Structure formats: C-alpha cells, structure tokens
C-alpha cells in the first residue's frame, strides 16, 4: 500500500540515517535534499525507494563513506574528476557546483566525473544550474541494458540525459533514459503484475517480451551478455528511429566515460566495487548570448504557446517539468507517496543504525 | 531513373553554377563541397537534389547573394551571428569555423546563428570539427512539422541534431531529425508510391496516416496550423517515449532560436523572406579532458566492440557514420547517384545562368 508522508519529517529521517552512516552533517543534508527533492517531484523510483540499494552498496564497500571527489585535470572551462567511489549524489553535487562556478566565470563549464556511483536522477543536477539562471545538462552511464540497433546483446547503458533551462513560471526540465524506458519501469510493471504494454524489452534483438510473468527472460535483463535487452528510444528498427536512441546512448558515453577515461557501460559490474559509472555535468551561462531576462521571457512564451495548443480530446499539452512541478506543489500540501515495503526497508536501516524512525513517520 | 555521375565533374558544375549566381569563387567552392560531400555520403535528399529549392530561394530573394554573416555578440567561448539571410551553407561554415577557432583557443566554442537559411545536413558541420580532432555538434530549427505530445497541431520543427566525434578508422557521425523521420522521407515515399510503413504521420494527434495516395492529408504536412503532423522520435505516446523526441526538439530550439533571439520554428514561413531558421554550432576540444590520442583510441575500441556484437541473423551492427563512410568509398570509385528529374532541374538552372552543363554530365 502507498501512504503519504510529510516531506520535512522524511527529510529529517534521511538526514539522520546518513549522519549515522558516518557522513558529515553537510553531506547528509545534501543527500537528504536530493532524495526528498526526487520524491517531491514525483519520481518515486529514484527517491527514498533507492535507499535500500545505497545501503547495500555502503555495506559492501561499493560506496565509500570517507572518499572525496578529486579534480585530476582542469581548465577554465572544464574538469575531470576522480570521485574515488564516494556516494553518487555527493559526487554529482560537487561536480555540478564546479561546472556552475566555471560557467559563471568563463561562460561554460564541462565536468566529466569517473569512478562515481549511482547518482539518482540526472534532472536534479541539470536543475541545479537552472536554479542559478544557467542552462544545465547532466548524464550518466550505467550497466549495459540497451540493445545497439541490430544487436542481440545489450551493450550500451540506459544512459539518461537531464537538461534544464530557466523558465517562468517554473524551469524546463527534460530527464529521460535513452532507452524507451529505464530498467526501473520494467521492475515497477512486474511488481504491479502488469504486462509490458509496448515494445520495451526485446529477446534476440527483435522479439518483444510483453508477459510480466516471463521471469526467465525478464531476469536476463540484469545478466551481462544475455540475449535480452531494453529497446533504444525509437525501438529496434531503423524505420521507427531506433538508431537515434542508440546514437544518443553513445553520445552520453562520450561525455561520461570516454572523456574522463573511466569505465564504459559495458564494463560496469554491480558486484565489482572497483568499477563504477561516470557522469557528465555541463553549465552554460545564457548571458554570453544575450540579456538573460529577454532569453528567459522568449523561452517561457514559447513554452506557453505549446501548452495552449489544441490537444487530443481529454488530454493536455504538458512541457517538460510541468508534471513534476504539479507533483511538487502537491507534495508540499499533502506529503510524498511511499509504499509500505519501502517504509519497512527504511525502518530496518534506521534501527540497525540506532536511529529512531517512528517519530518521523507519524 | 537514377544514374551515377563522377563526383569531381559534378563538383565543377555546381561550382560554376554558384559562381554564375554571383557568389565569389571561394564561396562557390564551399557550397559545392558541402553539396557533393552530402551526395557522396549517401544522403541524396540533401545534395544536388536541393539545388532547385535553393534556386527558387535565390530568385525570390529569400537567399541573398551579397549578404555576409555578422557577429553581433561575442565572448571567448561563444558568439551570436546574424546571417542576414545569406546562403545557409556559407552561414554554417562561417559559424562552425568560428566555433572551432574558439574551441582551439579556449576549449569550447558555442555559436548561435539567426536569420540563416536551409543549411543542408547538420552532420556536415559537426564533422567539420571532428575533422580537426574536436567534438562537433550542430543543429537547426525548421518549419513547424513535429507534433508536441498530446497536441493535434504541429509546432516544433523537425529540428535535426548532428554530432561528430573523431574516431578510427573514420569519424563517428550521428545525424538525425528529432521527429521519427524528416519531411523529406515522406516526400520520397510518395514519389516512390510506397505506403508509409510506420507511424510517421499523425492526423488529429493520434491517427496514423499510412496510405501514400492520401494526398489531401499528406499535403497538410506543409500547411501551417493544420491537423496533420510528423510524430516526434518515440511516437505520439508517452508509452513509446514520444515526449523524449518532443523534448529533444525543444532543446534544439533553445540552442538555435532562443539563445540567438531569432525566429522560432513556429514563426518560420517559407513565403516570407524576412523570417528564417536559426542554427547552433558547438566545438569542444577533447584535450581539455585528457590526451587526444588516448581518448580517440578508447572511443574507437568501444565502437569496434559494438560492431563485433552478435547480431540478428542476416543483419550487422553499424555505428553512426559506418554506412555513410561506405557510401563515400563507393562514390569515389563509382560516382554519385542522381535521379533524372534532378539532372533536368540542374540543366535548366545551368542553361538559364549560361553554364554549359553537358561537359560535366558525360
């Protein structure tokens, strides 16, 4: 069952848990903020629901509590960071703050970060830049899940891209896996016992898997070098543009693992603590092109024109960030949605760490 | 009928035609190079086939022969250019050369160009950077063709993105419309009297149009504010990722018309000579991240691993640029493919301009 919880109290609980792991107060605040931000914006798959996974990684040493990101190469407009397998969110915030600083000083900042960890949603980091009036872009590679066009074996990660641009009444935030859907979507459908409605998963490169009870094949999605994979955005055929999603996945790989000389998606292995994802962080100051207010006003008017277009009966045109903003407003008023299984996981973690969870879950 | 023509001779003919229009020798060489490059790489829809369209635009004043691009704002890493409606290819080459110069000096160059014209293929400009060891990105907005998710009326352009990265044995070049297919693809299928095999065109936002004889509806693709449009990459449903293609189209709009404060896709009107597309040109020097050779070697090995993956029987895994490179090698050996209708158009243009075409078409 899914219940609603007060976001401020849940923030306090997450903060206490991360302090109990041994992270500093400041770092724990950052982690709690990214996690609660994610739930408040309606992306529940990547919020507190992921704390159990991070907990496993903290316990098995894949996430190293005492690691700090290190700048290994730097110019006025760029940096390469070795994150030494610290917590992904902390690496992400550090890296994007550096990109933002460079953008404010030099117009553009591009940071490529290796030996990182799972960092949550790409859109969070992109929006860090937008919150400061800049264009923000972030992406991450990930375990191999995507089928290159015509291949029967997954090789490219789901490699999401987050892109944010300041706008009124709220920022434009585009955040998407370069596969048709991310891995998490398949898990959600299996938990809900729903068949996969579209061609999201392919066996042998071309055969769709729809049946949610096909555990044998769907479990292969997590097995390296299997014959089951996620379709790229656009599907498995060039006639539907599948080669475009495949190409976008490669683009992400360039800005993450290739430029930083880190581990590429196909090398990432959940069980090996010395291999980890790479991420990219770009900030661009629009004032190098013109007046910030005029640019934002023009962009906001453009977005509003699209919201006002004639729509399919019963539907509405949303631009990217609209639905997330509605979730956010609702979360302030009514709390964030968390399922019972996740609450049990969080309580177990809290108890183990000597944190009293109940007062925050009232 | 399609015949093959010697690319060097065809280059000479295009060069003479552009000189006869009144372009300088140097400018005419640039235009001829981009056009013949396009045909040699197998993208015949955007090569000499487009000369008739450019001819109409030169005659009606939409393309202005004596215009030169003007830098209206500039920093070490950026520029805004007003192209004053000069020929798109010349604006594109000028703009990308400026982005490359800035990337070589400062690591990154981002140029946004307004009041431009149809510039051919985005991948050509991206590859100009890759030819010099840099990452290159280019995009253009265009007349409204794409349906925003849930809308019944096209609003966003087909807004293609070209992305190139140096690699061995040849550069990686990704070049794609952010719609499932570009306008030109629909025209090709109609000319060939073939039905549209996939959900490329939607009526009222959700109804696929497949029948190539449905002239009434397919002609509406060119009519502003009609109820027929191209599907975004990913289709018209969020279940197939259509909102992602829509978002990519908006991203292109930001880097082209929003940052340059030029005309947005929905404002572009083929019949109004004072409205024109905007383009974006980005160059990034990989040496700001690390050793160029090491980065290119890592990337090339990554691409080769994908080419060697197990494939669907009878198919092969290609990475972006492979097919175009094979076309190029074939064109050197056997010439470029041009249909008779296009040859007749070129002859008509040549004759009108006093250029003797026959000697180049032997």
Image (cartoon, coloured by chain):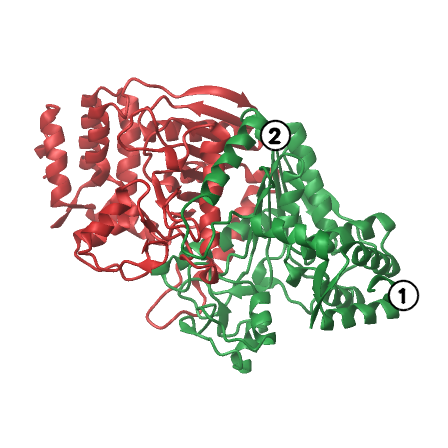
Chain colours: A red, B green
Query: Which image quadrant is residue A139 in?
Result: top left
The image position of residue B92, as x and y in percent, is: 70, 49
**Comparing labels 1 and 2, the label whose residue is closer to the camera:** 1
Q: Secondary structure at mark 2?
A: loop
Q: Is residue A187 above or below residue B108?
A: below
The local crowd at label 1, few if under 14, some if 14 to 19, many if 20 or more residues have their Cα within 10 Å, is some
The image position of residue A345, as x and y in percent, is: 13, 36
Please tell me how many numbered marks the rendered image carries: 2
Q: Is residue A115 visible?
A: yes
Residue drawn at 55 percent across, 81 percent down: B215
Residue drawn at 66 percent across, 51 percent down: B328
Nearer to us in this view, A130 or B236: B236
Horizontal side of A291 relative to A234 (left or right) equals: right
Residue reaching furthest top? A66
Q: Which mark is residue B356?
A: 1
Q: Secondary structure at mark 1?
A: loop
Quadrant in which the C terminus of chain A appears: top left
Gap in Å between the C-alphas at discs 1 and 2?
46 Å
Nearer to us in this view, B145 or A236: A236
The local crowd at label 2, few if under 14, some if 14 to 19, many if 20 or more residues have their Cα within 10 Å, is many
Residue with the mark numbered 2:
B107
């Amino acid at each position: 069952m899914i219940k609603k919880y007060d976001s401020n109290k849940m923030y306090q609980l997450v903060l206490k848990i991360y302090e109990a792991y041994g992270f500093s107060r400041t770092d724990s605040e950052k982690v709690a903020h990214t996690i609660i931000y994610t739930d408040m914006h309606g992306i529940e798959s990547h919020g507190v629901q992921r704390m159990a996974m991070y907990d496993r990684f903290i316990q098995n040493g894949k996430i190293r509590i005492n690691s700090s990101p290190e700048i290994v190469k730097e110019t006025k407009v760029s940096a390469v960071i070795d994150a030494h397998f610290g917590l992904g969110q902390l690496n992400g915030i550090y890296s994007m703050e550096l990109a933002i600083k460079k953008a404010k000083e030099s117009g553009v900042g591009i940071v490529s970060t290796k030996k990182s960890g799972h960092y949550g949603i790409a859109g969070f980091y992109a929006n860090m830049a937008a919150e400061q009036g800049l264009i923000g872009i972030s992406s991450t590679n990930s375990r191999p899940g995507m089928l290159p066009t015509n291949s029967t074996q997954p090789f490219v990660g789901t490699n999401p891209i987050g892109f944010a641009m300041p706008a009124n009444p709220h920022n434009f935030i585009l955040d998407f896996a370069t596969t048709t859907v991310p891995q998490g979507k398949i898990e959600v459908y299996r938990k809900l016992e729903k068949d996969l409605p579209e061609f999201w998963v392919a066996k042998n490169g071309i055969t769709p898997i729809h049946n949610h009870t096909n555990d044998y094949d769907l479990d292969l999605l997590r097995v390296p070098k299997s014959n089951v994979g996620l379709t790229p955005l656009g599907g498995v055929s060039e006639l539907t543009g599948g080669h475009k999603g495949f190409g976008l996945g490669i683009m992400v790989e360039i800005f993450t693992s290739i430029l930083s000389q880190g581990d590429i998606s196909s090398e990432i292995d959940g069980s090996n603590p010395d291999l980890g994802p790479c991420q990219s962080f770009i900030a661009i100051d629009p004032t190098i092109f013109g007046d910030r207010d005029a640019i934002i006003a023009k962009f906001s008017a453009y977005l509003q024109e699209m919201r006002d277009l004639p729509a399919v009966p019963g539907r509405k045109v949303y631009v990217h960030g609209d639905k997330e903003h509605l979730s956010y407003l609702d979360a302030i008023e009514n709390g964030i949605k968390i399922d019972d299984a996740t609450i049990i996981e969080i309580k177990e973690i809290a108890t183990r760490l000597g944190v009293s969870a109940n007062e925050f879950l009232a």
